[in-house]
Each structure stands twice: as C-alpha cells, then as structure tokens.
Image (tube, rainbow, N blue to C red):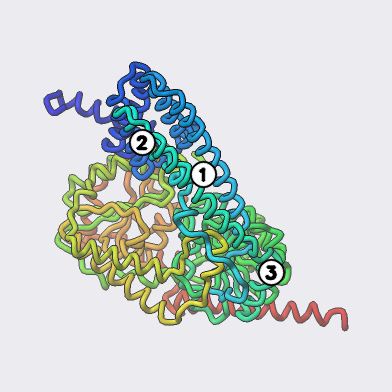
C-alpha cells in the first residue's frame, strides 16, 4: 500500500472507511475479523463436500473464534447479521449441519451419524426449553416500579439467578455443542468412535444439568411480590419521605445522550429547601442517572404512575417537552413548571407547547423576551427569571490564567430533529474550521454534542474526520495515571447508586444512601479532573466524548469557545471569556446579531473561516478584545444578576410556588364550607 501514489492511497483509505460504515465495524482490525468470519463460513460447505477434514477443522475453528471476537469488537455487525436472519442460533446450526455432512462424506458409521443428529437436535431442543424458561423468569422479575434511594427491604424479593445461568445464557448454551463437535472431529481423524459418543454425552449432560438448575431458579421466582404489594411499599416509603417537589422526565429513546437533561439538575435539587423526588418513565434512565441522594422512582406505565401517592408534591419541574408529560400534568393539585435543559436562541427554547405549564422558568431577561416574541402564547406573568444554578463551577475570566499556547474549545451543537432546525456547523464548516485552527498554532479541545450524528450521516462523517485530524487517540498517558483514573471511575460508579440487573434486583438492592457519599463523590470527581488534565498536559489536542471531563471543566480549560447557536454559548457567557458563533449562512453581521441574542457579545465566524486569524487576536492580545464590554452587558441580560445567586433565586421560586400551591389547596378545601 505504501508504494502506491498518494491519491490512490487516499482513495483506498476512503473506500475502506465506506466499507467499514456499511458493515458497521469501527476499523481495519474489525474488518479483518469480518473477512475471516465470512471466509470461514463460505469454506465450510466446500470443505465438507470435498471432503477435507483438516481444512474443515481449520475453517470451523475460524468461524467459532471470529464469531466470538465480533460480539465484543463489532456488535453493530452482529446486529446487522441478525436482521438478515443470520442469528447466532442459525450460525451454530449451520456449523452442525456442515459437520454432519462432512461425517457422511467420510463414511462415518450410520450409528455415529444417527446418534449425532439425534444428540445435536436434542441439544437445540434443550436450548429452546431453556430460553422459554429464562423468558418466564425474566417476565416475572419485571416490576411496575423501580426505585433508588428508598429502603425497599420491607418486601421479600428473591435474589436474581446466578450470572452463570442468567446472563448471556444463549451464548453459553449454544457453546455446549463444542464437546459433541470436537468429539466427532477427533473420531473422524482417528477412526475411534468412542470419542464421538463421549462428546455427545458431555453435550447432552451439560445442557440437561443447566436446564435443571434454571428450573430451580424458576421455583424461587414464583414467590415474587405482586404489583399491588410493590406499589404499596413504594407509597409507604414516599409517605415517609414526604416529597414536595418532583422532577419529571420522559423521553422516547432514553440513553446516556439524553440523560444529561436530568443530570444537570440533580445538584440544584439537592440544595433546595423543599424535599425533592425524581420521577422517570423509562427503565433505561436508571443506567445513566448520575449519583444522587434524592429518592428516584421509575414508573414506565401511566396506570402505575396514577397509583403512586404523590399527593404531597406541590411543584413539578419538567426539563423537557415529551408526550408522556401529560400523565403528570393531569395532577391538578400541583403547580407545573417548565425549566428546560438549557437556555438558548433555538426555537425549542420558546416553544408554544410550554403554554400548558403554570410557569416557565428562564435564566434571565433574554429568556423572557424570547417567549414574549411568541405572540399570544405565553403571558408575561407566567415567566420567572431564576438564573442558571448549574454554572457555579464555571470560573470567570479574571480567575483564568492563559498558557503560552491558546486553548480553543470547539463545541458544536447537533443536527436537530429535522433540516429545518439544523444549527450545527459541523456539516458546512466543521472540517475547514479545524484545519484553520491547526494552521494557527493553538491547542484544540473538541467536544461535540452527545447526539452528534444520530440523524445526519453528513454530521457523523464530519465528526469522524475532525477526530482523525486531531489524532487525539495518539496521546500516551502514563500507566499510573490511567490506572488511577480507572480506579476513580469505578468508585464513582459504586457511589452513583447504580445496580446491575433487572427490576427486581434493583428494587432488592435499593437503600437510603450514605450521607458521607456526596462529599466523597465530589472529591473524587475533582481528583479525576486534576489527574486527567495533568496527565495530558503534553498533548496537543483533545477529543472529549465521555461524560468526564464535564463540559464546564472544558470551559475552565479554554481561552476561547467556538460554537453554534445553542445553550452551550449561553452557559459560556458566565465565564466572560471571548467566544465565537459560527455564521454558516454568511448572514450580514447586523442581521445575525438581531436574530440571536447571544451573538451580541460574540465574534462572528464566516463559513470560509477567513476571520479566524483576526478573532484569535482577542486571545493572543487580551487588550485587543473589542467584544469584552459587550460580554459583560450580555451576561446579566442572558443569565441574570450575580446577586442574589442563581441558586438563591431558583430556591426562592420553588418556595414561592409551593406556598401558592398550598394556599390554593387550602382554599379548595374550605370552599364547600363557605
């Protein structure tokens, strides 16, 4: 390949990337595994019919090993196979049929062939019975409510079956055909048929023992408490906690990418005067919920939600607009507030749907004005300015000491749900922007939106190209630092309150959290960030894709932000550092600033990035920063005043609304007596 012309090498590399994208593999190593896998399966019928015992054995081994490797290295490819009806079970069946065909072609005795066919068929029958039993156990262990940070020891929930029997059971059971296969191959090679019969016996015996063991687990799970008992115990625990404020969240496709909408509010909720509770609607939410001491209740079904005793809740907070919000909005006794998950100039931050809530809380006057521009939708009295309590960790410009090489944070937004609301700069100018920054001798931190590439293939391609340009994966981290980071991450997972397992296991392990856990959690997160940045101090660039380091820690490292119209920009305004808004449509500056509030304190970057060298002067020569005064004015307009603090204003808003809710309830009770 290295003797080819440069243009040919580039074209070949692009073709390989395209092939990897089609096959859903991430690199050349995984592509090689796919080739070996396909070649092995293609060779099996040919070598069985020739027949070639040793060739067949080699291909048989390759298919086994490649199949297992692909499950861990390229799960997307394995899922693609399943959609083509080439499931794991089918692949095991193909190997079995081809082996029996080989035995027939090599004139194995009829008794060996008939017994092999019977044994391997029985093995698949046992696998089917095991699968049915496993499904029955799993269905019984699905509960109407799952909780965290409530003591559910008052109800008897059986321990989940051992992982050996329960987790990845199909993979383990299907592999029990190995003794039968190996025994038959040895018998074909040696002519001694005892090896075949021994292998058959081991396969059937092991599968039968596994089925009997799982049957014992099924008997245990039959004493699982019913729906009414579970909900009654949850209600008893909620009555003891007496929640007054609820954060309610639902999303159709919950993943780590969406749960930031909840996680960003956890610390604020924990600091309220009123007792909070978090109500989630999708089970997957629990996997990505950050550490909290707040009671958390997950109720997937609307009928079960209606059974929960949330009568003491006076205020319900909604970080997102979702269809399932109506299940909570119907609680007329509470006050309902849309708090959103970021304050930006996007249309989503002034949605007419928000009219269904009693109040809408925004960061500053900019949010109020944005809603007032939506004519006849939201009354001015329904809008409350509460600041952004989450921004406390963001250090101000005065506390920041720039290094010798400017640090530029590029944090583009995602492509949106449709082309109409596509604000991302990745597609039209992301790659030229990075190339321009690389030519300007700066350090780059690239942190794309968590949803980048979820809808647009163009955005995903631009994201991949930027990562390749930055070559962040080439950074070598000392083993000691890597080991400590992994150790801290593991402990953070423990402190998060996450539990592996199904509904029943999570309910069984739910406990009231240790009061000392919050301090340890914060200390460990601070230590993680210190080690991370110190261990990469020699790195030229960074690509940040995980939850840590956090966005606000990236703010603190940066001298300049380059971003799109999004809440990221509004949050960065708190630092008073210079920032850049991408003007991918090349609108006139006056028109762009009139359309987007946060553009008032921004440097505007044209699509061709010709303004980039001049913009970087604001970092290299701090005295040459004509937007500094505008940023100071904009900060109060967008985020509100520094005093009282955002936390104090948010807490006061909760208290005021809760008091009004209580007063209205009292009036409703007294009304019949008047």
Front of the two marks 3 and 2:
2
Please tell me how crowded label 2 is: few (under 14), some (14-19), or many (20+) other residues with Cα within 10 Å. many
Q: Quadrant of residue 392?
A: bottom left
Residue 557: quadrant of the picture: bottom left
Mark identifier at residue 229: 3
Q: Is residue 527 left or right of residue 267?
A: left
Q: Which residue is mark 2?
A: 195
Please indicate whether residue 498 sits to the left or right of residue 353 in the image.
left
Asked whether 500 or 101 is in front, the reply is 101
Q: Depth check: give the residue in front, 234 or 105.
A: 105
Q: Residues within 10 Å of mark 1 (few under 14, many from 20)?
A: few
Nearer to us: label 3 or label 1: 3
**Cα distance, mark 3 to mark 2?**
55 Å
Q: Residue at x 36, y 45 (%)?
A: 72
Secondary structure category for the residue under label 3: helix
> Percent x, y for residue 295?
55, 73
Query: Mark 3 or 2 closer to N-term?
Result: 2
Q: Residues within 10 Å of mark 3 (few under 14, many from 20)?
A: few
Local SS, label 2 = helix
Spatial CA distance of label 2 from label 1 is 60 Å
> What residue is drawn where x is 22% and y is 46%?
471
Q: Earlier in the sequence, mark 3 or mark 1?
A: 3
Task: Determine whether, in the image, residue 552 is placed left or right of residue 656.
Answer: left
Residue 511, disc? none
- Label 1: state its secondary structure: loop
Q: Is residue 628 visible?
A: no
Numbered tag placed on residue 417 in the rendering = 1
Nearer the observer, 310 or 227: 227
């Amino acid at each position: 390949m290295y003797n080819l012309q440069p243009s040919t090498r580039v074209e070949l590399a692009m073709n390989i990337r395209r092939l990897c994208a089609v096959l859903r593999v991430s690199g050349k190593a995984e592509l090689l595994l796919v080739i070996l896998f396909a070649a092995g399966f293609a060779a099996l019928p040919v070598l069985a019919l020739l027949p070639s015992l040793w060739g067949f054995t080699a291909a048989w081994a390759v298919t086994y090993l490649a199949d297992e490797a692909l499950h861990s290295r390229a799960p997307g490819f394995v899922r693609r196979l399943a959609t083509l009806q080439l499931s794991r079970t089918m692949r095991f069946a193909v190997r079995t049929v081809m082996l029996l065909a080989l035995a027939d072609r090599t004139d194995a005795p009829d008794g060996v062939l008939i017994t092999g066919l019977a044994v391997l068929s029985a093995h698949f029958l046992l696998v089917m019975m095991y699968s049915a039993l496993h499904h029955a156990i799993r269905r019984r262990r699905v509960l109407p409510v799952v909780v965290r940070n409530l003591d559910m020891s008052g109800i008897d929930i059986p321990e989940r079956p051992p992982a050996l029997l329960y987790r990845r059971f199909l993979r383990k059971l299907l592999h029990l055909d190995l003794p039968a296969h190996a025994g038959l191959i040895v018998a074909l090679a040696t002519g001694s048929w005892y090896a075949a019969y021994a292998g058959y016996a081991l396969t059937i015996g092991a599968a039968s023992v596994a089925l009997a063991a799982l049957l014992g687990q099924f008997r245990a799970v039959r004493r699982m408490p019913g729906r009414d008992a579970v909900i009654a115990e949850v209600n008893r625990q909620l009555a003891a906690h007496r929640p007054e404020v609820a954060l309610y969240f639902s999303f159709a496709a919950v993943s780590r990418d969406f749960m930031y909408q909840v996680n960003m509010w956890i610390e604020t909720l924990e600091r309220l005067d009123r007792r909070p509770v978090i109500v989630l609607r999708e089970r997957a939410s629990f996997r990505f919920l950050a550490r909290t001491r707040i009671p958390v209740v997950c109720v997937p079904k609307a009928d079960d939600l209606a059974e929960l005793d949330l009568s003491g809740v006076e205020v319900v907070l909604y970080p997102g607009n979702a269809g399932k919000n109506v299940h909570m909005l119907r609680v007329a006794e509470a006050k309902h507030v849309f708090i959103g998950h970021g304050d930006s100039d996007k249309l989503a931050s002034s949605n007419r749907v928000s009219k269904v809530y009693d109040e809408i809380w925004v960061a500053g006057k900019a949010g109020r004005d944005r809603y007032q521009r939506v004519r006849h939708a939201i009354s001015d009295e329904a809008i409350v300015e509460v600041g952004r309590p989450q921004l406390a960790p963001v250090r101000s410009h005065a506390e920041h000491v720039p290094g010798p090489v400017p640090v530029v944070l590029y944090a583009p937004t995602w492509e949106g749900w449709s082309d109409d609301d596509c604000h991302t700069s990745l597609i039209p100018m992301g790659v030229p922007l990075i190339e321009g920054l690389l030519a300007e001798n700066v350090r780059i931190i690239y942190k794309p939106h968590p949803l980048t590439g979820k809808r647009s293939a163009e955005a995903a391609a631009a994201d991949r190209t930027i990562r390749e340009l930055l070559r962040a994966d080439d950074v070598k981290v000392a083993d000691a630092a890597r080991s400590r980071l992994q150790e801290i991450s593991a402990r953070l997972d423990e402190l998060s309150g996450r539990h592996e397992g199904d509904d029943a296991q999570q309910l069984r392990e739910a406990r009231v959290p240790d009061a000392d856990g919050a301090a340890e959690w914060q200390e460990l997160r601070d230590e993680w960030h210190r080690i991370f940045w110190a261990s990469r101090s020699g790195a030229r660039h960074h690509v940040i894709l995980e939850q840590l380091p956090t966005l606000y820690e990236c703010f603190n490292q940066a001298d300049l932000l380059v971003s799109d119209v999004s809440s990221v920009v509004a949050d960065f305004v708190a630092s008073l550092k210079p920032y850049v808004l991408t003007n991918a449509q090349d609108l006139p500056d006056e028109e762009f600033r009139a359309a987007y509030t946060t553009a008032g304190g921004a440097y505007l970057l044209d699509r061709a990035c010709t303004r980039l060298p001049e913009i970087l002067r604001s970092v290299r020569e701090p005295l040459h920063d004509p937007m500094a005064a505008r940023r100071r004015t904009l900060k109060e307009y967008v985020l509100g005043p520094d005093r009282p603090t955002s936390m104090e204003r948010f807490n006061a808003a909760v208290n005021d609304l809760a008091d009004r809710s209580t007063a209205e309830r009292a009036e409703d009770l007294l009304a019949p007596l008047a």
